[in-house]
Structure formats: structure tokens, C-alpha cells
Image (spheres, rainbow, N blue to C red):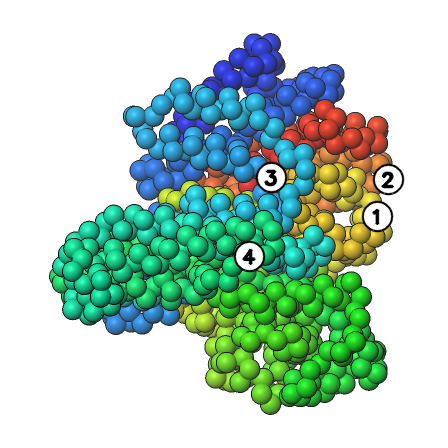
């Protein structure tokens, strides 16, 4: 892997020259000395650690800011080098399964499946990727743009313009790397649309051409143009759970912005398409579609799409106006359905195919058709998410206004009876003189937005913390009450351990209700929460509860004759359900992708997986190949003895986890001293507050800052606590052979073990101990030592079970990736420890002071180095 190291070294040299140019040679010499000492510290040199700690303690705030910026930039450049390496020729021989479709193809070559089986699977292939604005993307959009330009230069190989790269790195250095102002939800939505415009717009047709090529190799034919395996959705501007800044007015604004951008991009495509479709040969059917005055035209295809181009121009103009002013100046037709675009384009496609112009038909025209199928009328379909408590408050005010009682005081049976009766009642629900509170009016206004928005712009309605059938019925009733003509599918989000265990019962009760399945039109969405369940019970208990819930829901809906789409609310970290996509899909229960795959793409993982077209093509191919494989050869049903052992291990893991989190009286104090959790709130990452309730403690802290904080001090506690204890107990109780059987024959267990190995490799007890030594009260240090001892014991347990001497022993790529970053991470950790001590001693709340700015840069740098931080 010399190419990766050489690339990192070359970029580091250019950054060093930039620092010397702008900050002086003395500054560069200091940074280089720190880098070399960091390398020695990584090798175990305690004298180097003491010397570097002394240097940092003696430096003033401004110097620490410069050092923090330097090492943060080193890590960002290392990430670019790794992205380049990932798609390089050298990586193909070193990274596991470089061709996502290789395994699938080989199985067809061995005649495991027929060509007809592939075609059927391809027709069922459906991926819905949901972009979310969860605040773990620490890199500003302007810097992301510069990084992409550096990537593009490096991809040119021998034609690379090093002067241009030096210029971009200088621009990077002279740009403030940390936002001074927290982004608004509109800013976040704009960033999401930029990911589509800058990367996915190019990547999607390239991915589908790759899928065509696989189909041709296996079946002899490409995919039919009508097959739509990919859709894009978003929570940006629709997720109002705990975010007071996402209002109905803002959602309208985001929808208008999305529709305007879609019209702009489609207009650009159709302009190019009009230039390309210059041929005169056309079918009689196409000639018959043209107006009489164009029957003798020499460019029939251009004439057919001319009205569509005018429609797009008008749509962009009107949606821009709606975005800026909140209203439109005319009521002329605008783009509201993809059929307005697809109908004439399919007519062009059909004509070209009939005329034997197959290559032209399946060229830019088909690329355009597939973009429209994927991105729809607004580039994304918007989800709406709201907390169940907010819905209950709405209904309570309505029932009090109606004089029928207080909804909040009713039992679940009483709630269901009322809601079912009202769903069947033709009269309006809302009283004529109803005067709701501002909070209730906001919920009703949100449902009104759904009613007035083209149905194709909206996706599903998600209920956070759903726990009862009434939670779903209530949202159905609100949509009826607000006149939603095409109600959004309602998806309960089961998040806690108890809710996951009760999910099957809730859905069984719903489907037993008269009229429910008819209203659902044969398809049910259920969202599985990974973040809060792991925060509630620990990673092993949560992952096993998620598996059990999915398995039970799949079997229930199959028996009820309902299609089930499971929506996976994953984050980037293991503690929030993250991990390699291919392995994750194949480790789910059999039948889990029969209704398609719907999954959140969150925070910085959007950039790492989809921020560049070539990476996006690879990520989409990984998803598609895994889903096809799961459709063709579902993973095995777990044996009864596997389930029993996992039940026991999950119980042990949960008890261990909750002992520390809930029962250890000093845990909260330790957490807040040993990590930058309190200071994290100053980092203007996202629009949403870190807590659902401002006055709450750990229990109200969102899963993202909970995990982000632990990743900063490298204890990474939420991603491993409890697992090793459970594994050791199972082995000690004589279940080692059974565990080996599970590892060899059950993808779920195999992926758990692989992901835990990665987690342990990213944790660092020594770094965590340095935080404790400087920042934690003496009375709490014993707790920190106990947790680090637990980490060491758990790591040894896993290595012993795997029969390995070191972590990532069989993953050279993963080990190399971590190793490249470590010498840049160590100085940032030492800087952060010093800066936390200074901020806390001074009670410094001035966010623009050098000390606070340096702390925020250090946080961002560590996040860049750890990569999957939330």
C-alpha cells in the first residue's frame, strides 16, 4: 500500500509549503517537530509524550489554533488520498471484493441461479436512500468543493497540475474551517441538493449503465428502461422531531427550493438532449404526436420535447419566486408529475428503437429518463417526521374543544375506539371555532403542507417514539382532517428496546382493525431505530432486538398478505447501526429486502459514500449487489440454539451496559468531564439542538452527540460496552463451538464480530487515559480506569475467540487506513485536552476567542480522522 502513503506524504508536503508561505518557516518547523514526536508517541515513546505535552501547555491560544488547523487539514487531505486509493488499480488487489458484482457474477457462471431468476430479482430491486442532516458533517460545503477539485486533479495521474493543487490547498488554509453561525434547516437542505447536483446526478446513470452491463453478462439483455431501482428521499426540511427551527413555513420553502433546482437540472439535460436528438428518422406514431404546423419538421424529436423545456423554464421561475416570497405570480401549469417529463421522452425512446437507432435510444436519452425516474419532480421526496407526543397534544386540544374529554388521560383502548370512529365519520373533525395553541397549530400547518404539495414530492410520515397502535391511527386521522387527498403512508419508528420487542404486537393489532389494510393499500412502512435502541440498551442487545423485530414483522406481514418496507435509521458508527453496507444487508433476516431497502444516509457518511461520482457509483453498486444476492439467496433462518444463545448474550450485555449508564452514580459526572460533551454544543454543526429537551440530562441527549463525544476521547464506549462481557461469559459457559458455528454459518453473527473488531481498533485506552489524567476529578478516575480495563479485557476476549494476535490482522486495508491517520490524531487529542482544560478553567464562552476556535477545530479534526463519528 505504498501508493496511499506516498499520496499522503505528497499532499502533506504541499500543505507544509502552504503553512510556511502564510505562517512562516518557524511555524512549519514546530508543526513538523510535533508530527515526528507524534510518530514516536504512537510507537510508545513516553519521553516524546511528556515533551510534546509540555510544548502544547506552554503555547499560547493563537499558536494552538494554528497547530490544530494544521493537523486537521492533514487529516482531511489524508481522507482525499484514501478516496483516490480506493478507486486505484493497486487497491483492486488489496481491498476485499473490489468489484461489488464479482461474487454475484461468479455464482451465475457456476449456474447457481438462472438468467430468469436474475431478471425477477432485478425487477424487485428497489433502493430508497434517505439523506438526513444529522449533525456529524463537520466540514463546510465550501471546503468540500475544494477537496473535490483536489481529488479531480489527483485522478488525472501523470497529467496532474501540482500548481493547481497547491493553489487549492492555499485557499483551504486561508478559509475559516469552522462555521461561525449554525446552519439553518434550509442551509442543510441546500447542502443535500448540492450532493445530488455535484455527484449523484452523474453517478446514477453511470451506476445504472453498470447494472445494465451486469444484466447483459448474465441474461444477454440490459435492464428494461422502466425498471427503477433507485429513489432519493430526504429528511432535510421535513424532520421536525426536537428541532424547533423546522416549521411548516420552512418546509414549504425547502419544497419550493427543491422543485426549482430540479427544474434547472432537468432543463439543462433537455437542452443537451435537444442538441443530440437532431435525427429525422422517426416512427409514424411519433410524427402523429406533432402539431400540424410541425408535421414537415426535419427535427421531430426536438419539436416533441420543446413544450417540456418551456414547462421547466416556467416551473423554475415560479418555484424560485415561491421560495423567495412565499407566493407565485401566476397560476399557469408547472411541473407536478414525472409523467409530464417521462411521457414525451418514452415516446422518443420508442421511436428510436423502432427505427433501429438503439445506440442513440440507450445513450443520453436513457440516462435522462433514469435521472427523472430516480429524482422525481423535486430531486428528492420529502419525509415528514414528528414525535408521537406532539400528535397526542394535538388530539388532546381537539377532544377538549369538542367536549368529549381529555385524550391524554384516556387508555389505549379508549384512544383506539375514538380514532377509529372518527376515521369512519364523514363529518369534519376540527370544530369551526377551534383556537389551538401555537404548538398544535404548527402540527396542523405541517399536515396542511402535505395536503397542498404535489403527492410525488412527498414520501412517508414517520412517528418518532411510536409505541401503540393509536400513534399510527392518530396521524391517519390528522391527514383526513386536513384534507390530504393522497395520504402519506404512516411509518411507526420503533426505537427503544421495549418498543422493538413490542413492534410485532403493535402491527398485529393495527392489521386486525377493519379498514386498516385497505387504507395502507397493501404496503406498510416500519422504521427500525438503531440510534436510540443502542443508547438505551447497548450495541449487542439493540442489534439483536432489531433483528428479532424485523424477523417477526416480516413473518407477520407475509402472513397478512402485506408488502413490508423496512426503513433502517442507521448512522455512521457501529453504535448507531453503521458498518459496511454489503455485509449489513446480507446479515438481516431472510425476506428483509423483499419490499425494498430504505435506509438513512447521515452526516459525514453522505460525503464519504456519495460525495464523488466514482465513489457514489461504487456505493450504489455495493447496495444493489447485496440486495440482489439477498433476493436470490436469502440468509439462513437462525437455528433455535443460535437464538437462545443470542438471547442470553444480549441479556448479559444489556445488564453490563445499563449498570454503568444507569446505576453507576458517578457516570454522568465522569462522562461530562472525560469527554467534550458540554463543549460540543458550541460546535455549530447542524440546525438541531443536541437535546430533545433543554433541561434534560443524559436520557434526553440525542444519540449522535452521545456517540460523537465518546469518539473524541477515543473510548468509543457506546459502540462496545457489554459485548465483550457477553462473549466471555458465553465462551466460559462452554458455548465456544456453538459461537464458531454461528460465525461460520450465520451472516448476522459474522458481521457483529467483524464490526466489533473495527470498533476496538478505533478505540485507544492510552489516549482516553490522558483525558482522565488532566480533566477528571480524582474521585472519578477509578471509574475511568474500570472502563478502560473493561475495554482491554473485551479486546483480549475477542482476539482470543478469533485466534488472532492483533486487531484487523486479516484486514490490511482497514489497518493501514487507521495507521495513516494516527500520527495526525495524536497531536489533536493532546491539543483538545489542553484546550478543554483552559476553556473550563476560564469558563470561556466566547465562541470567537482563539481558545474556543482552536477547540472547535480540534473537534472537527478528530471527527475527520475517525470518519464515522455519528
The residue at the point 68 percent across, 65 percent down is 445
Residue, far front: 293
The vertical placement of 703 against 489, above or below, is: above
Badge 4: how crowded within 10 Å, few (<14), some, or many (20+)? some
Q: Earlier in the sequence, mark 2 or mark 3?
A: 3
Q: CA distance from mark 3 to mark 4?
A: 36 Å
| Residue 205 position within the rendered picture, expressed as x and y whole percent measured from the top left | 33, 53
19 relative to 708, above or below: above
Q: CA distance from mark 2 to mark 3?
A: 34 Å
Q: Which type of secondary structure does the marked residue at label 3 adopt?
A: loop
Circle on res. 666: 1
Give the foreground label among 1 and 3.
3
Q: Residue at the spot x=36%, y=62% of the render?
A: 341
Which of 323/860 is in front? 323
Contact between labelled residues 1 and 4, with CB atoms less than 8 Å apart: no
Secondary element under disc 1, as helix, strand or loop, is: loop
Return the x and y of residue 93 as percentages of the image width and height. Answer: 32, 41
Nearest-to-viewer mark from 4 and 1: 4
Which residue position is annotated with label 3?
138
Which quarter of the figure is the N terminus placed in?
top left
Q: Secondary structure at mark 4?
A: loop
Amino acid at each position: 500500500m505504498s501508493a496511499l502513503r506516498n499520496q499522503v506524504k505528497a499532499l502533506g508536503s504541499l500543505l507544509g509549503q502552504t503553512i510556511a508561505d502564510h505562517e512562516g518557516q518557524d511555524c512549519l518547523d514546530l508543526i513538523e517537530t510535533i508530527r515526528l514526536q507524534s510518530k514516536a508517541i504512537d510507537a510508545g515513546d513516553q519521553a516524546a509524550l511528556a515533551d510534546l505535552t509540555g510544548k502544547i501547555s506552554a503555547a499560547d491560544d493563537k499558536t494552538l489554533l494554528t497547530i490544530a488547523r494544521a493537523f486537521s487539514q492533514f487529516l482531511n487531505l489524508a481522507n482525499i488520498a484514501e478516496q483516490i486509493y480506493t478507486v486505484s488499480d493497486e487497491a483492486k488487489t488489496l481491498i476485499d471484493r473490489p468489484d461489488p458484482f464479482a461474487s454475484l457474477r461468479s455464482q451465475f457462471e457456476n449456474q447457481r441461479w438462472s438468467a430468469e431468476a436474475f431478471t425477477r430479482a432485478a425487477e424487485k430491486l428497489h433502493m430508497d436512500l434517505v439523506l438526513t442532516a444529522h449533525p456529524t458533517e463537520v466540514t463546510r460545503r465550501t471546503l468540500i468543493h475544494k477537496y473535490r477539485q483536489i481529488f479531480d486533479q489527483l485522478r488525472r495521474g501523470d497529467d496532474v497540475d501540482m500548481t493547481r493543487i497547491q493553489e487549492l490547498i492555499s485557499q483551504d488554509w486561508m478559509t475559516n474551517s469552522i462555521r461561525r453561525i449554525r446552519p439553518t434547516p434550509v442551509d442543510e437542505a441546500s447542502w443535500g441538493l448540492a450532493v445530488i447536483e455535484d455527484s449523484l446526478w452523474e453517478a446514477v446513470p453511470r451506476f445504472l449503465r453498470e447494472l445494465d452491463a451486469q444484466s447483459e453478462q448474465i441474461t444477454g439483455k440490459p435492464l428494461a428502461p422502466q425498471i427503477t431501482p433507485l429513489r432519493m428521499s430526504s429528511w432535510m426540511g421535513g424532520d421536525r422531531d426536537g428541532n424547533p427551527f423546522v416549521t411548516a413555513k420552512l418546509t414549504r420553502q425547502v419544497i419550493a427550493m427543491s422543485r426549482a433546482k430540479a427544474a434547472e437540472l432537468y432543463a439543462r439535460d433537455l437542452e443537451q438532449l435537444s442538441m443530440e436528438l437532431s435525427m429525422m428518422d422517426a416512427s409514424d406514431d411519433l410524427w402523429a404526436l406533432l402539431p400540424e404546423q410541425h408535421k414537415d419538421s426535419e427535427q421531430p424529436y426536438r419539436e416533441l420535447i420543446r413544450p417540456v423545456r418551456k414547462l421547466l423554464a416556467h416551473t423554475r421561475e415560479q418555484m424560485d419566486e415561491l421560495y423567495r416570497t412565499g407566493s407565485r405570480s401566476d397560476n399557469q401549469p408547472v411541473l407536478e408529475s414525472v409523467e409530464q417529463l417521462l411521457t414525451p421522452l418514452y415516446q422518443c425512446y420508442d421511436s428510436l428503437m423502432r427505427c433501429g437507432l438503439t445506440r442513440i435510444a440507450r445513450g443520453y436519452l436513457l440516462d435522462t429518463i433514469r435521472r427523472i425516474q430516480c429524482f422525481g419532480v423535486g430531486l428528492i421526496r420529502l419525509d415528514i417526521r414528528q414525535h408521537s407526543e406532539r400528535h397526542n397534544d394535538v388530539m388532546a386540544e381537539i377532544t377538549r374543544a369538542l367536549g368529549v374529554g381529555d385524550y391524554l388521560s384516556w387508555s389505549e383502548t379508549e384512544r383506539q375506539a375514538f380514532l377509529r370512529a372518527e376515521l369512519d365519520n364523514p363529518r369534519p373533525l376540527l370544530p369551526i371555532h377551534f383556537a389551538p395553541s401555537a404548538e398544535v397549530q404548527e402540527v396542523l400547518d405541517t399536515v396542511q403542507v402535505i395536503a397542498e404539495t404535489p403527492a410525488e414530492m412527498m414520501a412517508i410520515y414517520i412517528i418518532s417514539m411510536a409505541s401503540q397502535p393509536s400513534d399510527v391511527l392518530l396521524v391517519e386521522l390528522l391527514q383526513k382532517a386536513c384534507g390530504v387527498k393522497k395520504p402519506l403512508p404512516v411509518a411507526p419508528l420503533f426505537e427503544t428496546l421495549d418498543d422493538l420487542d413490542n413492534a410485532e404486537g403493535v402491527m398485529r393489532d393495527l392489521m386486525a382493525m377493519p379498514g386498516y389494510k385497505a387504507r395502507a393499500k397493501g404496503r406498510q412502512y416500519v422504521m427500525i431505530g438503531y440510534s436510540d435502541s443502542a443508547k438505551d440498551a447497548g450495541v449487542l442487545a439493540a442489534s439483536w432486538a432489531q433483528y428479532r423485530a424485523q424477523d417477526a414483522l416480516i413473518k407477520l406481514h407475509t402472513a397478512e398478505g402485506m408488502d413490508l418496507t423496512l426503513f433502517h435509521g442507521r448512522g455512521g458508527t457501529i453504535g448507531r447501526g453503521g458498518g459496511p453496507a454489503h455485509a449489513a444487508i446480507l446479515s438481516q433476516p431472510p425476506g428483509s429486502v423483499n419490499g425494498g431497502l430504505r435506509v438513512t444516509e447521515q452526516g459525514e457518511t453522505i460525503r464519504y459514500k456519495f460525495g464523488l461520482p466514482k465513489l457514489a457509483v461504487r456505493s450504489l453498486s455495493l447496495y444493489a449487489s447485496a440486495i440482489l444476492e439477498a433476493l436470490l439467496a436469502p440468509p439462513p433462518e437462525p437455528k433455535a440454539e443460535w437464538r437462545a444463545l443470542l438471547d442470553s448474550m444480549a441479556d448479559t450485555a444489556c445488564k453490563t451496559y445499563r449498570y454503568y449508564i444507569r446505576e453507576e452514580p458517578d457516570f454522568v459526572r465522569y462522562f461530562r468531564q472525560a469527554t467534550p460533551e458540554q463543549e460540543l454544543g458550541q460546535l455549530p454543526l447542524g440546525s438541531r439542538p443536541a437535546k430533545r429537551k433543554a433541561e434534560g440530562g443524559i436520557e434526553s441527549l440525542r444519540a449522535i452527540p452521545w456517540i460523537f463525544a465518546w469518539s473524541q476521547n477515543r473510548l468509543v464506549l457506546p459502540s462496545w460496552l457489554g459485548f465483550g462481557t457477553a462473549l466471555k461469559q458465553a465462551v466460559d459457559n462452554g458455548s465456544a463451538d456453538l459461537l464458531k458455528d454461528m460465525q461460520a454459518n450465520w451472516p448476522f453473527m459474522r458481521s457483529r464480530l467483524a464490526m466489533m473488531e473495527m470498533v476496538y481498533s478505533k478505540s485507544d485506552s492510552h489516549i482516553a487515559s490522558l483525558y482522565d489524567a488532566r480533566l477528571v476529578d480524582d474521585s472519578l478516575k477509578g471509574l475511568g480506569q474500570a472502563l478502560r480495563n473493561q475495554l482491554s479485557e473485551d479486546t483480549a476476549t475477542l482476539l482470543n475467540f478469533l485466534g488472532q494476535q492483533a486487531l484487523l490482522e486479516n484486514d490490511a486495508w482497514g489497518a493501514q487506513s487507521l495507521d495513516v491517520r494516527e500520527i495526525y490524531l495524536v497531536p489533536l487529542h493532546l491539543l483538545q485536552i489542553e484546550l478543554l482544560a483552559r476553556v473550563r478553567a476560564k469558563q470561556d464562552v466566547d465562541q470567537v476567542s482563539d481558545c474556543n476556535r482552536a477547540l472547535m477545530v480540534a473537534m472537527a479534526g478528530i471527527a475527520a480522522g475517525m470518519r464515522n463519528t455519528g
